[in-house]
Image (cartoon, grey):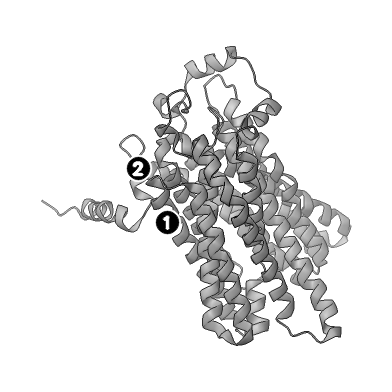
C-alpha cells in the first residue's frame, strides 16, 4: 500500500495549526478552515486593489506620466467619498430581501462588479495620459476624468466588498469566535497586499505602458475569479427567512442608526476609533521617507520597513484574536494598543536625535503592533455592540469611521510635511523636523484615544460588551448558521 503523503502533511498541519496559527481553532465541523480561507479570498482582492492604487499607479502617474501630485492625491482621495456610506451598505445587507433568502451575496457581487468596472476603465485612461499608440491625439482631460472615475469605482467596490464580506464571515461562525474570524480576514488582507506587491514588481520589470495595461486587466480578471470562488456556497439559501423578511415591517436606515447610537457608549467608541485610526494613519506614508532623509537608509532598507510594520501588525492581530477569544474586554485591549503606539512614535522621533537605526526599527515594530491590537479590538467591540440583526450596520459604522479617518490622517500628514519642508528650508530646520512634527501629532491623537477610552470600559461592561452568546437570550443575535 502506497504511503499517502498528502494525508500525512494535512495531519501535521492540523496538529500544529492551533499552536502557530491563532485563528485556526475558529473552524468547526460545519464551517471548516478550508471554507473560511476560501471566503477570505475577498480580502486578497481588496489587498490587490490597495497596492495597485496607492502603490503602483500612484508612482507611475506621478513619475512616468508626469501627472501633478495634487491631482493624483485627489484621485486617491476619491474613494473616501464612498467611505461614509459603509454604514448604509452594512444596513442594507442586514435587511436585504431576496427570493432566495440571501442578504450578503448580492452586495459582495455588486462590489465585485464595481471593482471590475474601475479596472476595465483604468487602462484606457492611462493610455490617454501616456500618449501611447493611437491615444496620442486624445485630450488630456479625457484621461484625467476617466482615471478619476476608475479610482472612484474601484474604491467603492473595495468598501462594499470588505464591509459585507466581514459581515458574512461573522455570520458563519459562533459569536464567541468573531474575534478569531476577524483576525483571519485581516491576516489574509496583509497576505494579499504583500503577495500582490511582489507579483506586480516582477511583472512590471521592465516597465512599459503596455505591460501596465496587461497587469491592470489581469487584476480585473483575477478579482472576479477570486471573489466568485470566495462566495461559492457560503451563504445558505433560506426561503423561510426570505418570507419572514417580506412580511416583517421595514425599518428605515435612520431608525436603525438611531438604535445603534442610542446605546450608551457607542458614540464614544466611534470617537475612540476615529482618534486612534487618525493617529496611526498619519505615519503610513512618512516612515520610509523619514528613514531615508533623517537616518540615511538606502532604498532597500526603507522598503523593508513595510514588512517590519506589517509583521508587528500581524502579531497584534494574533494576540488580539487569542486574548479576545478568551473573553478579554475589547475596549481595554484597544486602549492598550493605542498606548503602545505612543512610545513607538516617541522612539521614532528620538532615533533622529541620537537614538539611531535600532531605535527607529523598534519604534516601527511597536507602532505596527499597536495598530494591529487597536484595529482588531475596536472592530470586535463594534461587533459585540451590534443590536439584534444589525451586525452589518455595526461593521459599516466601524469601517466608515476607520476609512475616513485613515484617509484624512494620510492627507494631513502629507500636507503638514510638505508645508514644513517648504518653509523649513528658509528657517534652516533639519531634515527630520517636519517628520517629527507629524509623529508628535500622532502621539497627541493616540493619547486622546487612550483618554477617551477610559470611561468607555465601564460603560460597555455595564451594557454588555461581551460576546452575544454569553448574553441573555433576549439580547442575543439570531444564529444565521442554522440555515446552513
Circle on res. 58: none
> Can you tell which quarter of the image residue 385 is in?
top right
- In percent of width and height, residue 335 lies at 54, 55
Q: Name the residue beneath numbered marker 1.
A: 318
Q: Is residue 318 above or below residue 63?
A: above
Query: Which numbered disc, 2 or 1, marks the residue that appears first in the sequence?
Result: 2
How far apart marks 2 and 1 lie (CA) works out to 16 Å
Q: Is residue 48 above or below residue 439?
A: above
Q: Is residue 336 visible?
A: yes
Q: Is residue 71 above or below residue 269?
A: below
Query: Regarding mark 2 in the picture, which secondary structure is present there?
Result: loop
Residue situated in front as seen by the camera: 382 or 484:
382
| Residue lying at 43% horizontally and 31% vertically, measured from the top left | 471
> Can you tell which quarter of the image residue 108 is in?
top right
The C terminus sits in image quarter: top left
- In percent of width and height, residue 346 lies at 60, 73
Circle on res. 27: 2
Query: Regarding mark 1 in the picture, which secondary structure is present there?
Result: helix
| Lateral position of residue 477 relative to residue 447, left or right | left
| Residue lying at 46% horizontally and 56% vertically, measured from the top left | 317
- In percent of width and height, residue 394 lies at 59, 37
Amino acid at each position: 500500500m502506497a504511503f499517502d503523503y498528502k494525508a500525512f502533511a494535512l495531519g501535521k498541519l492540523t496538529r500544529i495549526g492551533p499552536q502557530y496559527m491563532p485563528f485556526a481553532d475558529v473552524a468547526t465541523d460545519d464551517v471548516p478552515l478550508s471554507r473560511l480561507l476560501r471566503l477570505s479570498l475577498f480580502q486578497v482582492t481588496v489587498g490587490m486593489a490597495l497596492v495597485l492604487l496607492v502603490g503602483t499607479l500612484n508612482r507611475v502617474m506621478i513619475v512616468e506620466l508626469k501627472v501633478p501630485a495634487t491631482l493624483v492625491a485627489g484621485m486617491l482621495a476619491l474613494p473616501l467619498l464612498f467611505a461614509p456610506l459603509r454604514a448604509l451598505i452594512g444596513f442594507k445587507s442586514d435587511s436585504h430581501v431576496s427570493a432566495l433568502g440571501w442578504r450578503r451575496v448580492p452586495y459582495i457581487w455588486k462590489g465585485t462588479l464595481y471593482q471590475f468596472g474601475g479596472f476595465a476603465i483604468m487602462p484606457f485612461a492611462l493610455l490617454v495620459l501616456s500618449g501611447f499608440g493611437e491615444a496620442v491625439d486624445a485630450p488630456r482631460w479625457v484621461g484625467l476624468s476617466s482615471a478619476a472615475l476608475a479610482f472612484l469605482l474601484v474604491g467603492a467596490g473595495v468598501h462594499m466588498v470588505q464591509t459585507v464580506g466581514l459581515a458574512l464571515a461573522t455570520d458563519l461562525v459562533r459569536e464567541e469566535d468573531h474575534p478569531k474570524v476577524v483576525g483571519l480576514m485581516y491576516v489574509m488582507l496583509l497576505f494579499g497586499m504583500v503577495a500582490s506587491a511582489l507579483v506586480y514588481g516582477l511583472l512590471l520589470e521592465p516597465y512599459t505602458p503596455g505591460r501596465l495595461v496587461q497587469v491592470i486587466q489581469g487584476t480585473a480578471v483575477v478579482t472576479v475569479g477570486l471573489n466568485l470562488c470566495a462566495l461559492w456556497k457560503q451563504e445558505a439559501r433560506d426561503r423561510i427567512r426570505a418570507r419572514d423578511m417580506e412580511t416583517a415591517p421595514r425599518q428605515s436606515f435612520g431608525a436603525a442608526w438611531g438604535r445603534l447610537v442610542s446605546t450608551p457608549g457607542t458614540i464614544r467608541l466611534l470617537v475612540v476609533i476615529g482618534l486612534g485610526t487618525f493617529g496611526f494613519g498619519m505615519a503610513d506614508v512618512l516612515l520610509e521617507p523619514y528613514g531615508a532623509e533623517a537616518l540615511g537608509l538606502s532604498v532597500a532598507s526603507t522598503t523593508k520597513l513595510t514588512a517590519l510594520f506589517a509583521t508587528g501588525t500581524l502579531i497584534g492581530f494574533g494576540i488580539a484574536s487569542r486574548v479576545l477569544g478568551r473573553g478579554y474586554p475589547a475596549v481595554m485591549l484597544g486602549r492598550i494598543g493605542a498606548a503602545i503606539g505612543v512610545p513607538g512614535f516617541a522612539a521614532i522621533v528620538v532615533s533622529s536625535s541620537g537614538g539611531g537605526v535600532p531605535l527607529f526599527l523598534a519604534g516601527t515594530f511597536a507602532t505596527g503592533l499597536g495598530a494591529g491590537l487597536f484595529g482588531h479590538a475596536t472592530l470586535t467591540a463594534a461587533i459585540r455592540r451590534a443590536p439584534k440583526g444589525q451586525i452589518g450596520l455595526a461593521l459599516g459604522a466601524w469601517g466608515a469611521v476607520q476609512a475616513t479617518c485613515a484617509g484624512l490622517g494620510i492627507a494631513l500628514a502629507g500636507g503638514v510635511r510638505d508645508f514644513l519642508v517648504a518653509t523649513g528650508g528658509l528657517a534652516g530646520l533639519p531634515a527630520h523636523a517636519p517628520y517629527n512634527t507629524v509623529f508628535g501629532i500622532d502621539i497627541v491623537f493616540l493619547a486622546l484615544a487612550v483618554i477617551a477610552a477610559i470611561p468607555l470600559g465601564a460603560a460597555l461592561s455595564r451594557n454588555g460588551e461581551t460576546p452575544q452568546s454569553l448574553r441573555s437570550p433576549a439580547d442575543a443575535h439570531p444564529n444565521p448558521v442554522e440555515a446552513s
